[in-house]
Image (spheres, rainbow, N blue to C red):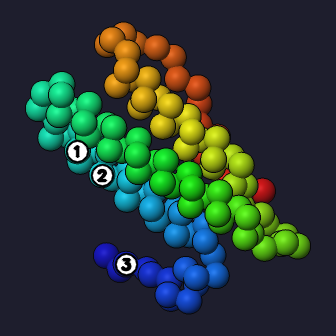
Amino acid sequence: MKVLSMPASTHHRHPALRVAARISCCLGLAVSLLAHAGDEDMEREQLARIAHEIAELEAMVAAAAQNKPTGQRVRFRYEWLQRDLQLVRDGITQHVDAPRQPRPAPPLRGDYRQ
């Protein structure tokens, strides 16, 4: 299987790619941490850590949105990404703070290109 990578200079020109890479890492961390969570306290600690990482991502997205290029034919929708990150972080926080009861979750937008 061939792994494709982008030149380092591309990452500097496209802050959205850095954010997307960080999101992928954060979600991978979330899955691996939760897969190994043995008890409830450990799970809550790990979820709080994930929520903190998402908060850092939100700050990165806000900074990238401030520096976004203008006049592009295809634009990255930072506000959609910000909304989705907030939904995920809020869901984690609510889970950590609430008793174990199922609740509906709003759907993520997902497509950040226009």
Closer to the camera: disc 3 or disc 1? Answer: 1
Secondary structure under the numbered disc 2 in the rendered image:
helix
Q: Are marks 2 and 3 in contact (CB under 8 Å)?
A: no
Mark 3: which amino acid? Val
Quarter residue 66 falls in: bottom right
Residue identified by numbered label 3: 3
Residue 27 placement, left or right of 108: left
Pointer 2 or 3: first along the chain: 3
Spatial CA span between label 2 and label 1:
6 Å
Gap in Å between the C-alphas at discs 2 and 3?
21 Å
Q: Which residue is mark 2?
A: 29
For this view, does 34 lie left or right of residue 50?
left
Looking at the image, which is closer to me, 113 or 81? 81
Q: Residue at x 26, y 40 (%)?
A: 46
Image x and y of residue 8, in percent: 49, 87
Q: Is residue 98 above or below residue 3?
A: above
Q: Residues within 10 Å of mark 3 (few under 14, many from 20)?
A: few
Q: Is residue 4 visible?
A: yes
Residue type marked 2: Leu
**Residue in the picture at 69% in, 55% down:** 78
Mark carried by residue 97:
none
Is 27 or 93 nearer to us in this picture?
93
- Work out whether residue 111 can be spotted: no
